[in-house]
Image (cartoon, rainbow, N blue to C red):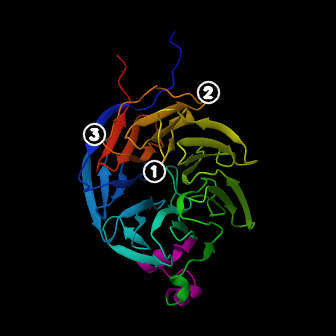
Amino acid sequence: MKKPTVSYPTELKQVLSTHIGPVNVVRYNNQTSKYCLSGGADRTIRLWNPSAGKEVKVYKGHGYEVLGLDIAPDNASFASCGGDKAVLIWDVASGTITRRLQGHFGKINVVRYVGGGAGAKDGGGNVLVSGSFDSKVMLWDMRYVVVLLTGTRLAPWVDRFKGSAQARVPIQTLQEARDSITSISIPPSSADGAEIVTGCVDGVVRSYDVRMGKLVSDTIGAPVTSVVVSPTAPKDSVLVASLDSSIRLMDRTNGQMLATFKHDKFVNTAYRSQVAFGYGEEVVLAGDDQGCLWAWNIIDSKSLMEQPEKVHDKVITWVESHPLNGEELLTASADGTIKVWGKKKEE
């Protein structure tokens, strides 16, 4: 009987290549994860069926590059951000912009719905979180958008809210960071937005408990470019990537480092690159500045390859694991492509 081995999708299935210039972000949709959205330097957002290699729709409305995307839990709308210094809310079906959230004074690097993720249900998404070059994290009330789109009169206060300044300003601003916010992760269990984890260029990972007014800071030292809470144990651990060519698995309860994933040939010192847990959290996946895709066994922290092949011509900007099965993986790159990876069929 063969001993089971740790694996991840390594066979190239599709190349999605209609973006012009770097692709900065790619995200699966919620619930089914059959589709994905991508955003790039060409100021467009594109909806794909990745397994089929088909572009479904193009969304245009940004005046500058798109740096961040997230999809509402019901998949009916999505949020995007970038160099415009505003978060745009889109209707997926019509492609229209339903709301602009303005308040940041610098480019916005990341946006996240609360209550999102592959298993998200229609009840989430009341709060949106954005992080910016201006070092601020802002929380936005999305219930106003629902009222605007449906015309539903939910309560007497709604009419007052629709015409007031509260409809256009964040409900809360977190200002503890000392440099650009690069990454935000919302624990799946945090359906009401109580917990927010942020990564910052100042080298600190900050975990907010908004309801309790509590902040826990863990200093990494090097600029942090990616934070990803564990999908299966979000209260216990978080994956942190930084520009010292290191990825760390941190214990959220006490700030201790559980493991470090690195290699002499793995170089990530210049660009933001989103890392990911592999499906089932058997592996940690990351792209480097040369366009190589790396994988480490999460148990012993060893690289699965001594020197991975170069899979993109330029830096890999984003790695996205399929959240519902281990059969698919997405990588986005500054070379203008998104590559869809699948598992090789056993002989």
**Amino acid carrying mark 2 in the image:** Asp
Secondary structure mostly seen in magenta is helix
**Tag 2 or tag 3, which sits nearer the N-term?**
3
Please name the residue that numbered disc 1 is placed on. Answer: 270
For label 3, the crowd category at 10 Å Cα-Cα, with few meaning under 14, some 14 to 19 and many 20 or more, is some
Answer left or right for 311 relative to 106.
Answer: left
Residue 168: % across, % down = 50, 82
Q: Residue at x 49, y 49 (%)?
A: 118
Please name the residue that numbered disc 2 is placed on. Answer: 300
| Marks 1/2: CA–CA distance | 27 Å
Q: Residue at x 64, y 55 (%)?
A: 205
Could you tell me which secondary element the residue under label 3 belongs to?
strand
Q: Which residues are magenta?
A: 138-162
Mark seen at residue 14: 3
Q: Is residue 130 above or below residue 330?
A: below
Answer left or right for 337 relative to 276.
Answer: left
Classify residue 77 by image quadrant.
Answer: bottom left
Residue 225: % across, % down = 52, 53
Q: Is residue 33 above or below residue 84?
A: above
| Marks 3/2: CA–CA distance | 31 Å
Answer left or right for 139 relative to 14.
Answer: right
Could you tell me which secondary element the residue under label 1 belongs to?
loop
**Tag 2 or tag 1, which sits nearer the N-term?**
1
Answer left or right for 329 relative to 261.
Answer: left
Q: Nearer the viewer, residue 154 or 17?
A: 17
